[in-house]
Image (cartoon, rainbow, N blue to C red):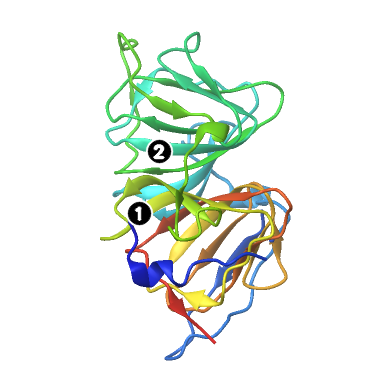
Amino acid sequence: MLSSSIFSLILIGCPAKSTTETAAPKQAVETAVAVATDAPPDGDWKAVYPNMPSGPKMILLSGNPGEGAFSAMVKLPAGHGSELHTHPAAFHGVSVSGTVTNGRTAEDAVELSPGSVWTQPADEAHYTGCAGDTDCIFVGHMEGAMGTNTADGPVEASTQTITAGPDVTYTPVNLEAPQGPGMFALSGDMTKGAFTAVVNFPGGATSPKHSHSSSYAAAVVSGTVSHGGDTNMNAGDHWTQEGGAAHVTACASETPCVFFVSMEGAMDMTPAE
């Protein structure tokens, strides 16, 4: 739960590009959008496995998958299906587009429609694929280095957890404004340190200008997000926000805006002029 001092600052109501904002010296000031694209360019996607250049691709948002915990956007080619495999760390994902499938085997895998949230436990054999004729994109966080290992066979029963998009319960950021922005925690404790979460902004909602002590990376899941200027970002677009830099975040669409956020430290908000 966030502190009362944070509650008093939270969003009070009324745009996937890749943008970067930098912290201003001393006093926080609003910063300009450095880069804007209508979708992550093909050149931004890097092969997850160098020996599979036509396989899964990734855009790193934070961390280092070779060393420890990290957050990333992942793209699976249409029709892709993995071998049964494991990871030494748990993964928390949010489906952005296409029909992602994940589960015990290809036959048992569950379809994860856009907006669905799931957790794949560490060291559990599983299958991940992309059903249909369009590529699949999801964003998420792995609690340690990726370390993919081939599995000898399926587990007796999958213990992944899945929450369909419409069933995700968002905790109000401001308990006195339950219809305002909310968060669904994925990993970490936002009151103590680094965390990842899914954020839901009501359509038309706008935050007051503010800053956070910690830097964060974010990616749009649905809706049209406006952040730090005139740039509108849609599903699959992403941005980074440097700690200490003042900014305004808004939902420019009539429907709610949902985005993934990976913050490097505890959640706080400081008003800015």
- At x 64%, y 61%, the residue is 205
Q: Which mark is residue 36?
A: none
- At x 50%, y 76%, the residue is 210
Give the Cα distance between marks 1 and 2.
Answer: 12 Å
Q: Position of residue 180 (x, y in %)?
A: 55, 57
| Quadrant housing the N terminus | bottom left
Q: Position of residue 73 (x, y in %)?
A: 52, 45
Report the front residue among 262 and 186: 186
Q: Which mark is residue 92?
A: 2
Do the CB atoms of the residues marked 1 and 2 lie less than 8 Å apart?
A: no
Q: Which residue is outermost to the front?
A: 176
Report the front residue among 118 and 209: 209
Q: Position of residue 222 (x, y in %)?
A: 64, 45
Q: Quadrant of residue 104?
A: top left
- At x 29%, y 36%, the residue is 89
For residue 269, above or below residue 94: below
Q: Is residue 119 left or right of residue 203?
A: left
> Secondary structure beneath disc 1?
strand
Q: Amino acid at mark 2?
A: His
Q: Quadrant of residue 127?
A: top left
Residue 157 at least partly seen: yes
Location of mark 1 (residue): 195
Q: Amino acid at mark 1?
A: Phe
